[in-house]
Amino acid sequence: MALTLRVVNVNNNIGFHSSFSRSTFVSPNPSKSSSREYNSFVFQCSQVEQLSVTESENSLIEALIGIQGRGRSTSPQQLNSIERAIQVLESLGGGVPDPAAASIGDGKRILFRFDRAAFSFKFLPFKVPYPVPFKLLGDEAKGWLDTTYLSHSGNLRISRGNKGTTFVLQKQTEPKQKLLTAISSGVGVREEIDKLISLNKNSGEEPELEEGEWQMIWNSQTVTDSWLENAANGLMGKQIVGKNGGIKYVVDILLGLKFSMTGTFVKSAPKVYEVTMDDAAIIGGPFGYPLEFGKKFILEILFSDNKVRISRGDNGIIFVHSRTNALR
């Protein structure tokens, strides 16, 4: 079974990490094959029930997009959205009724014992063994996962562990999920950007500069020594797009201070916007110190949906933004 761990912990118990490279799964029922593929299950349900389940699965996947690593930087709002989506799926009861090949009792618990661990570094072609005496740890090296939801397609699984950790695992990832994974690892970003843009062209849809709060998570420009220049060029911080052609850059500096730059945008051609930034200041609480800083540039939207946006600015700089606020 090849499953991808998408998010670790919606209960803020971040300690359980996926660096353990090998574990032994124990099945108390040897008659069930441990190599059984999830998508081999046969099911029957009404179209209405299936539509509700599919929408809820999509809601959970959408809530996970943009969350990197083990979720340490995830906002309380994002955690709440994920937890709500998980609870909806668990309460619907529309998944596979008996989801675990390795099972006990009610058929939903997987038992495991760790026997090997290693560090994995992206700059090394091999893993570094981590000398944990699992055999001496006894029951401390054991654990279990309860599968609380498994989609009929076999693509999505929700599991809750004995350490209080919640896992969402996914077999197949969407192109924008692959892009965010590439950004997190720092490998193959441009390739995934090109794939996503190509898919958007094939769809025939015209991407827009959508309203909302967008965090800059990657750009193709090497930053300069001046944080002020980086902030003004949109190479860091958050971008807030308003309803009526207003746009703002916000960058947290330190000790509660923020850099703020506001302006306007006008659509000049399909996918192309003229942006004018003409009001900059250092903000501290209710006070602001104005700065003489302004610029005009052309912004081309290459891809955009309700979670991820790819754009091209001056000098061919490519930006990837992730939406940080929930849609209303």
Image (cartoon, rainbow, N blue to C red):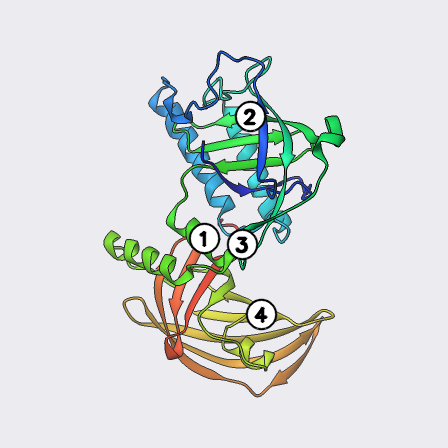
Residue 26 percent across, percent down from the top left: 59, 21
**Type of the residue with mark 1:** Lys
Residue at 28% x, 57% y: name it: 198
Cα separation, mark 4 vs mark 1, equals 19 Å
Specify the amino acid type for callout 2. Thr
Specify whether 246 is left or right of 119: left
Q: Secondary structure at mark 3?
A: loop
Across and down, in percent, residue 222 comes to 49, 75
Whole-percent x and y of residue 89?
51, 29
Mark 2 or mark 3: which is in front? 2
The residue shown at (50%, 84%) is 294
Q: Is residue 258 left or right of residue 102?
A: right
Amino acid at pointer 4:
Val
Q: Badge 3 is on which residue?
A: 325
The answer to which of marks 4 and 3 sits earlier in the sequence is 4
Camera sees residue 244: no
Q: Return the residue found at the far bottom.
A: 292
Nearer the observer, disc 2 or disc 4?
Answer: 2
| Residue located at (51% from left, 72% from top) | 235
Query: For residue 151, which quarter of the picture?
Result: top left
Callouts 2 and 4 close, C-beta under 8 Å: no
| Residue 42 left/right relative to 134 | left
Q: CA distance from mark 2 to mark 3?
A: 28 Å
Q: Considering only order in the chain, which callout, 4 or 2, is on the residue closer to the N terminus?
A: 2
Mark 3: amino acid = Asn
Relative to 150, is 255 on the left or the right? Answer: right
Mark 2: give few (<14), some (14-19) or many (20+) Cα within 10 Å. Answer: many
Which of marks 1 and 2 precedes in the sequence?
Answer: 2
